[in-house]
Amino acid sequence: MLASKKNTTGIVLMLMSMAAFAVGDTFVKASGSFLSPAQIMFFLISGGLILFALIAVAKGDNLKEPRAFAPVLLLRYCAEMIGLLCMIMGLTKVPLSIVGAVTQASPLLVAVGAVIFLKEAVSWRRWSSISIGFLGVVLVIQPWEESLNYAVIWPIVALIAFSIRDLVTRLTPPDIASASLATFTMVAALPFTTAWVFFTEEKFFPAEINWAIVACMVILGSVGYLLLITSLRVGELSAIMPFRYSRIVFLLILGFVVFGERPSLSMLLGSALIIISGVYVMWREHIVTQRIKRS
């Protein structure tokens, strides 16, 4: 009964996290009307740095971690930064639903990377599911359409970058606190995003800025991250992780309501395939893990 209650709490927190991320993505897209991608990234990184550093200090986490610049963490920082950059570019140029569906396919790409780089064994069932998931990505992108928006390359690169980040995270020392790790990531990214704004000769604080939208996108992104971490620590991963795909549903709804985006049948079918295959891959990983524990 206790485990069931914890799982229910974890699922609710995961849903809240994905809703926060989705609404935050909506504000990022809206901010594209008065901010450049460089300016958006500057606000997300600087705002995230302040919030995560405060959280780390409040929790008593170590912000003087000597391993903060270990090669594996530097690779993680780079992947996170590239992923965020491409995510922002995608959100400002591509429909919300497409960005959400493509980037949420990262567990499938992580599974492939784990086989290639970490030498993990994958059964034919999981290979089949991964293939179906990537078919879903193709259906979402619809590369055969003459009206193809080539800006879709941005969420594809974001997908690759976030998958590398998640893969490298498996090699990250588990005793480094999440808030500290997020703070280190923001510190590593801040010089790059500051230089990006400076060399494009854009203003850091343009006159037409809407501070309410900027504050919402920064706060919601940080809140979403904290809810995500909390949800994963409350209950069982096998019960909670499938609900991360709710972000696709939230983005479909927000894209329609806020921006009038009308997803095609191919887009909806592709999103469904990504969700189904992703949930199956997670479930199979849980089954394999349980078998290893019993043996």
Image (spheres, rainbow, N blue to C red):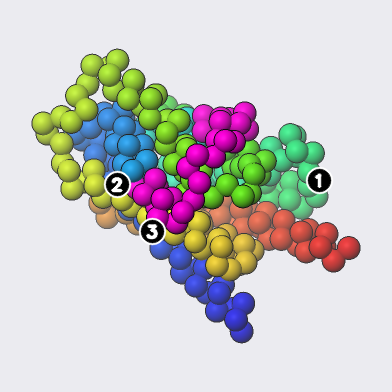
- Picture quadrant of residue 183: top left
Residue type at tag 3: Ala
Residue 198, how many percent across, how many down?
Answer: 27, 19
Q: Of callouts 2 and 3, which one flags the residue occurring earlier in the amino acid sequence?
A: 3
Task: Return the residue found at the far right.
Answer: 295
Please give the label number shown on residue 231. none
Distance from label 2 to label 1 (Cα)?
39 Å
What element does badge 1 sit on?
loop
Q: Nearer the viewer, mark 2 or mark 1?
A: 2
Q: Are marks 2 and 3 in contact (CB under 8 Å)?
A: no
Please determine whether, in this image, residue 126 is positioned above or below residue 46.
below
Residue 76, how many percent across, how many down?
Answer: 56, 34
User: Any magenta on residue 233?
Assistant: no
Q: Residues within 10 Å of mark 1 (few under 14, many from 20)?
A: few
Q: Name the residue carrying label 2.
A: 217
Judged left or right of residue 65, residue 54 is: left
- Picture quadrant of residue 32: top left
Please determine whether, in this image, residue 293 is positioned above or below residue 146.
below
Judged left or right of residue 24, residue 156 is: right
Please determine whether, in this image, residue 243 is positioned above or below residue 261.
below
Give me the residue at 33% from left, 52% from top: 220
Distance from label 3 to label 1 (Cα)?
34 Å
Task: Return the residue found at the far left.
Answer: 207
The residue nearer to you, when weighing 205 against 257, is 205
Q: Name the residue carrying label 3.
A: 19
- Can I make out residue 234 in this image? yes
Give me the residue at 18% from left, 48% from top: 212
What element does badge 2 sit on?
helix
The residue nearer to you, when weighing 294 against 48, is 48
Q: Of callouts 3 and 1, which one flags the residue occurring earlier in the amino acid sequence?
A: 3
Q: Name the residue carrying label 1.
A: 121
- Magenta residues span 51-79
